[in-house]
Image: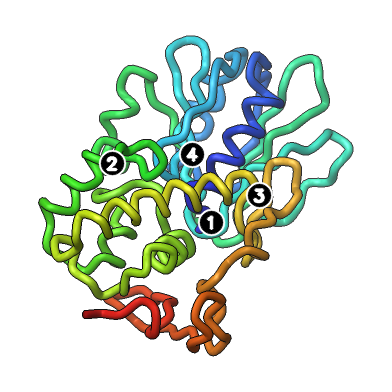
Amino acid sequence: MPELPEVETIARGLRRSLVGRTIVGGVCYCPKIVADNENRWLAAVTDKKLKGVRRRGKNLLLDLTGGLTLWVHLKMTGHLYLRTGDDPVEPHDRLIFYFRDHSDQLRFHDMRRFGRVRLFSTADVMNQRGLCDLGPDALEIGPKDFAALFAAHARLIKPALLDQRFLAGLGNIYADESLFSARIHPRRLTHSLSAAKISRLHEAIGEILQEAIGKMGTSVDNYAGVDGRPGGYQSYLRVYGRVGLDCPRCGGRIKRERIGSRSAHYCPRCQRLC
């Protein structure tokens, strides 16, 4: 699933290419993506201009004129691509938007069809379940609020970091990389960390997310930006996906362990549990 850096990269690409452009129509090849109401809202967005693109956690919000907002969640395999009218429609292109005075198309491509595109009034979109219940954004939370968040909960830290209601934007990749950077075992309890450890984790999350955004995200599966180019941060991963390899910091062996319903990659030597 695309995480915060990948979604932020997509948001920036959309801002550069489409803000100020007017939607003149669209076609949907998978009603499930738009909750079976594409005829209603495709008509509603026609002749509307894209005013801006926001990101909230792993969610994209495309604000249109007329007080409307498209809420996009890419889920596991969703992508937003810019294409031209000369490009053939691909088998997993589920939704296509057309724009005035240009041959560009915005295509929602999703092999597994888990992604969603919804239309709401801009005034009401943030009240929707899945947005209103998100925790603070992992890239925006300040150090004091971050420390208070950890002090208020007693739970395993790796599942906590993956819980979007706790902290929005992180997934397996960046949670593992941040815990490694801060030398925190993924089974540590949130409220058991010292103030210094919490501060270091906050710094690590911010640094790693910014570095990943600078590299246009991580492509360990099939993620790509709106221009179709893959990200580059996968070349800088230190623990994620490196099971059995040497730790780049201490030379220990990277381990993968099941914690809750998800896996965690870490170095047992320099991320000690006690």
Q: Amino acid at mark 4?
A: Val
Pair 3/4: label in front: 3
Q: Which residue is mark 3?
A: 215
Name the residue rendered at 42%, 68% in the picture.
180
Q: Which residue is mark 2?
A: 143
Q: Viewed as shown, does residue 99 lie left or right of 183?
A: right
Give the vertical position of 16 relative to 49 (above or below): below
Name the residue rendered at 35%, 76% in the picture.
271
Q: Amino acid at mark 1?
A: Arg
The residue nearer to you, when weighing 6 against 28, is 6
Q: Are marks 3 and 1 in contact (CB under 8 Å)?
A: no
Q: Are marks 2 and 3 in contact (CB under 8 Å)?
A: no
Q: Position of residue 53 (x, y in %)?
A: 53, 26
| Label 4 packing within 10 angstroms: few (<14), some (14-19), many (20+) | many
Give the structural element (helix, strand or loop) at label 2: helix
Q: Which residue is mark 1?
A: 113
Q: Which mark is residue 153?
A: none
Which comes sooner in the sequence, label 3 or label 1? Answer: 1
Give the structural element (helix, strand or loop) at label 4: strand
Distance from the alpha carbon under mark 1 to that under mark 2? 38 Å
Q: Which residue is mark 4?
A: 72
Name the residue rendered at 41%, 41% in the picture.
139
Distance from the alpha carbon under mark 2 to that under mark 4? 29 Å
One can see residue 200 in this view? yes
Which comes sooner in the sequence, label 2 or label 4? Answer: 4
| Label 2 packing within 10 angstroms: few (<14), some (14-19), many (20+) | some
Q: Viewed as shown, does residue 105 lie left or right of 265?
A: right
Q: In the rendered image, which quarter is residue 48 located in?
A: top right
Which comes sooner in the sequence, label 1 or label 2? Answer: 1
Q: In the rendered image, which quarter is residue 201 located in?
A: bottom left
